[in-house]
Amino acid sequence: MAQASTLNIRLLDSLKTHGNQVLEREGISASEAVRKLYEYLEREQKMPDCLMQKAEQDKYELRRRALKEFAGCAPLPEGFGADDVREERLARKGLL
């Protein structure tokens, strides 16, 4: 028989309480929900799309933050501002 492993995770009490309410309503235990996640990971060899959407959002948020840190680092040519950049982008897309 295969050896069973135990997972120990940390959750905010409120998250655990609310999550358990949903699981109970759906008729599934926390162990079964986690087991199903791991079965999916083993079978598909990737994260479920519903979990990756958040990860993608986080990735883009990190990029936005990094870009904001660089904003203003390089001097713009005299008389060239954000409106000029916007108009240039719109013109390239044929929207002006």
Image (cartoon, rainbow, N blue to C red):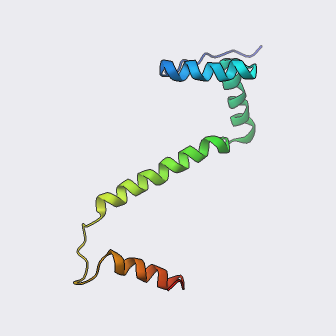
Relative to 14, say whether 63 is above or below. Answer: below
> Which residue appears at 63% of the width and 17% of the height?
5
> Which residue appears at 69% of the width and 41% of the height?
45
Residue 83 located left or right of residue 29: left
Give the camera-side residue of 5 and 40.
Answer: 40
Q: Where is residue 15 in the image (x, y as percent from the top left)?
A: 53, 24
Q: How many labels does the image show?
A: 0
> Which residue appears at 37% of the width and 54% of the height?
65
> Which residue appears at 61% of the width and 40% of the height?
51
Relative to 66, say whether 31 is above or below. Answer: above
Picture quarter with the N terminus:
top right
Give the camera-side residue of 40 and 77.
Answer: 77
Relative to 65, say whether 96 is above or below. Answer: below
Q: Position of residue 84 (x, y in %)?
A: 35, 81
Q: Quadrant of residue 86?
A: bottom left
Q: Where is residue 3 in the image (x, y as percent from the top left)?
A: 69, 15
Residue 10 located left or right of residue 3: left
Residue furthest right as drawn: 1
Q: Quadrant of residue 36?
A: top right
Q: In which quarter of the image is residue 94?
A: bottom right
Residue 87 located left or right of residue 95: left
Q: Where is residue 53 in the image (x, y as percent from the top left)?
A: 59, 47
Give the camera-side residue of 17 and 77.
Answer: 17
